[in-house]
């Protein structure tokens, strides 16, 4: 995605276009499911910004719906640019790798809870756990 597209997305979310915001969007695009340290390193290779500035940008972009923050059990927070489609994740129990998994049945069937307790449900998080191909091969090798 080009800088112009990031700028368009920021304006569409009623956010001011700044170099740190564009750099964070680019870093997340280049490193899907990246943790904050990875994003900071990527941004700092392009700009001289503080850790706090990157944290602030991540918060603003997540609040605006341009990024999604996920935090699988036992993991640090991670960020992705794929938003608004109710996809899920598969996480490797061994190395922590994370991949996207599309909803298995049409358009968000998991939003129909067996008992919604009166809530208006608009999102569901499903996390599948297992071993990635590399770790499952390694664990079988004597």
Image (tube, rainbow, N blue to C red):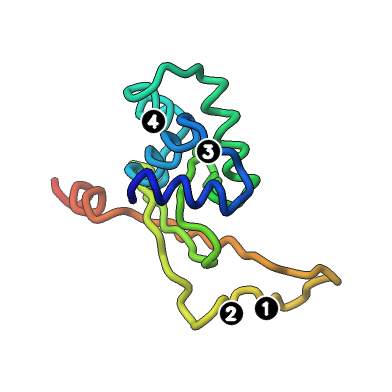
**Disc 2 vs disc 1: Cβ atoms closer than 8 Å?**
yes
Residue displayed at 67% across by 78% down: 112
Mark nearest the camera among 4 and 2 is 4
Question: At numbered mark 2, what does the secondary structure look like: helix, strand or loop?
Answer: helix
Question: Does label 4 or label 3 sit earlier along the sequence?
Answer: 3
| Residue 21 seen in the figure | yes
- At label 1, counting other C-alpha atoms closer than 10 Å, the crowd grade (few under 14, some 14-19, many 20 or more) is few
- At label 3, counting other C-alpha atoms closer than 10 Å, the crowd grade (few under 14, some 14-19, many 20 or more) is some
Say which mark, if any, is on residue 38. Answer: 4
Say which mark, if any, is on residue 17. Answer: 3
- At label 4, counting other C-alpha atoms closer than 10 Å, the crowd grade (few under 14, some 14-19, many 20 or more) is some
Mark 2–mark 3 Cα distance, whole angstroms, equals 36 Å
Mark 1–mark 3 Cα distance, whole angstroms, equals 38 Å
**Residue at which label 2 appears:** 109
**Disc 1 vs disc 3: Cβ atoms closer than 8 Å?**
no
Task: Find residue 74 and report its horizontal and vertical position in percent.
Answer: 52, 39
Image vertical order of residue 24 relative to residue 137, above or below: above
Say which mark, if any, is on residue 112. Answer: 1
Question: At numbered mark 1, what does the secondary structure look like: helix, strand or loop?
Answer: loop
Residue 71 lies in quadrant: top right
Mark 1–mark 4 Cα distance, whole angstroms, equals 36 Å
Residue displayed at 50% across by 35% down: 21
Question: At numbered mark 4, what does the secondary structure look like: helix, strand or loop?
Answer: helix
Mark nearest the camera among 2 and 3 is 3
Question: Does label 1 or label 4 sit earlier along the sequence?
Answer: 4
Mark 4–mark 2 Cα distance, whole angstroms, equals 33 Å
Mark nearest the camera among 4 and 3 is 3
């Amino acid at each position: 995605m080009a800088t112009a597209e990031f700028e368009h997305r920021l304006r569409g979310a009623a956010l001011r276009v700044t170099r740190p915001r564009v750099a964070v969007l680019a870093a997340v695009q280049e490193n899907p499911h990246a943790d904050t340290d990875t994003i900071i390193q990527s941004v700092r290779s392009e700009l001289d910004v503080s850790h706090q500035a990157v944290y602030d940008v991540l918060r603003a972009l997540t609040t605006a719906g341009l990024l999604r923050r996920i935090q699988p059990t036992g993991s640090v927070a991670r960020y992705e640019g794929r938003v608004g489609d109710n996809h899920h994740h598969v996480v490797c129990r061994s190395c922590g790798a994370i991949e996207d998994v599309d909803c298995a049945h049409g358009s968000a069937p998991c939003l129909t809870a067996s008992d919604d307790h009166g809530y208006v449900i608009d999102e569901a998080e499903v996390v599948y756990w297992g071993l990635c191909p590399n770790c499952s091969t390694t664990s079988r090798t004597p």
